[in-house]
Image (tube, grey):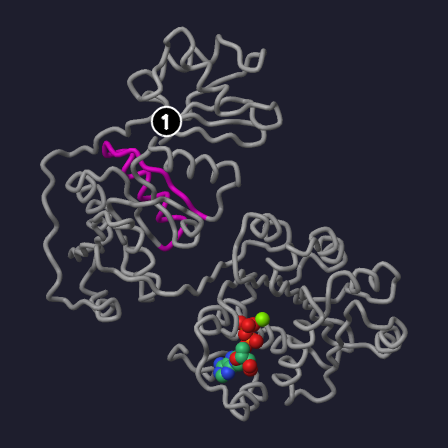
Amino acid sequence: MSSARFDQLPLDPSLLGNLNDLGYTQMTEIQARALPELLAGRDVIGQAKTGSGKTATFGLALLNKLRVERFRVQGLVLCPTRELADQVARELRKLARAIHNIKILTLCGGMPFGPQLASLDHGAHIVVGTPGRIEEHVRKGKLDLSEVHTLVLDEADRMLDMGFQETVDAIVAGTPAARQSLLFSATYPDSIEALAARVLHNPVRITVESKHSAQTINQHFYRVGNNEQRLAAVAQLLWHFQPGSAVIFCNTKRETEEIATHLNEHNVLALALHGDLEQKQRDQVLTCFANGSSRVLVATDVAARGLDIESLELVINYQLSRDPEVHVHRIGRTGRAGESGHAVSLVSEREDFKLTSVGASADAIEALPQARHQTLADPDWVTLQLDGGKKQKLRPGDIVGALTRNDCLVFEQIGKIAVADNWAYVAVDRGVWKKALQQLDKGKLKGRSFRVRRVNLG
Ligand code: ADP
Ligand code: MG
């Protein structure tokens, strides 16, 4: 449970009264974090474990927007199985008790067709069901989705596991483009990412994670005054700590770019990662950070979520997060696997109140350390990109073979190799990157030549 109450939300009084009757006063964490975004009309990806109250999260947003006097299907909830659809419909009916004449219909496979057609003839405000049967009704012209304002994909990971991808796409195609789309899932595999990219528009991603511990992490809190000092402090900390790898967490896309630009102008190569990057740019940034071609990544929490780096030497919180769980998650990225790491947070006087929520107090605040050298060592690696990948049957071994031919490079000078569908990245020792580029450029791989370029960072 979070400490937030439902009556802090801009919900219709009849919904609030009913929640009270149901004994729902405090929101669960996913509800407290997602409902404000949902009620503001944003698309949302919600990830939280089973039993965390996801149904009421999307249910309340859907019901709050519903115009019961307009007898058309306005909400559509897709679930992987009939059992889950029944559960969701039950919970929605419970939440909707105070709305008179509301009709919630379930449409699932394995049930006789006739009664469903009769129900559809009578009309409904909300349809809950499994993709196969719903698509069938749409295809036969029995279910009109043209007035759906809220689309929910519940347990989306399981729907994909069950092979519903194309069916879901076909259903979505029948709904208005201006709808609000919500996706809930317990896990977040790549296939969900692709589905979300097709169905959701500029979604907010909310993940409720289980806590991890913070034992092997050295935490420091540094005082900054205005924003200019905050920006300057980032470079100073990187110069001071000289980390092999570091992530700077900040709140907005604008900040990620502002900080990365500032660092690049101050002898520190840094990459910005935020939700508005195209998939290809995002892959490139993550690849170049993971393979050591950049020591520094500046990221929003959401964008950094998929980042799987074993152990960072330094995490900088550009601002303290107000949410203790986010804070623990950020600093938990250092000191993994028994290695020690530093987690530092920049705190202005106006932010001191946030210290208690992360288990610290203003006494913990230190002055910024003074750096001896105003530069961060260059990354050890440089990334080269080839314009061929899996589709051209290129494998990492082919790249290694080409690079080591005629004793051009030795194995130690070749770093991580990532092969995508139509291109490949290879990290090579900074000292020999030109030689490596020439070798790949003039030599043949798989009997043909590929174009090669150095990935230009910052
Ligand atoms: P999930 O979809 O995450 O598996 P559910 O939406 O089914 O979770 O909710 C699990 C249970 O918690 C349901 O029985 C529901 O009625 C109850 N529940 C949900 N939100 C609250 C709340 N804020 N207060 C009390 N009970 C709640
Ligand atoms: Mg659920």
Q: Nearer the viewer, residue 21 or 232?
A: 21
Image position of 146 (left or right of 335): right
Which residue is pictured at 43% across the width and 23% down the height?
Answer: 384
On the image, numbered disc 1 is attached to which residue? 415
Position of residue 297 measured from the top left corner of the image (x, y, whole percent) = 34, 42
Residue type, mark 1 in image: Gly
From this view, report whether residue 129 is shown above or below residue 455: below
Q: Secondary structure at mark 1?
A: strand
Q: Quadrant of the C terminus?
A: top left
Position of residue 196 measured from the top left corner of the image (x, y, whole percent) = 59, 53
Q: Nearer the viewer, residue 116 or 95?
A: 116
Question: Can the viewer see residue 296?
Answer: yes
Image position of 19 (left or right of 416): right
Residue furthest top in the image: 406
Residue furthest bottom in the image: 21
Which residue is pictured at 79% across the width and 64% down the height?
Answer: 133
- How many numbered marks does the figure carry? 1
Residue 261 falls within the magenta-colored stretch: yes
Image position of 367 (left or right of 148): left
Which residue is pictured at 84% across the width and 64% down the height?
Answer: 137
Position of residue 238 measured from the top left corner of the image (x, y, whole percent) = 21, 41
Q: Which residues are magenta?
A: 251-274
Which residue is pictured at 27% across the width and 60% down the height?
Answer: 320
From this view, report whether residue 72 is shown above or below residue 369: below
Residue 204 falls within the magenta-colored stretch: no
From this view, report whether residue 400 is shown above or below residue 247: above
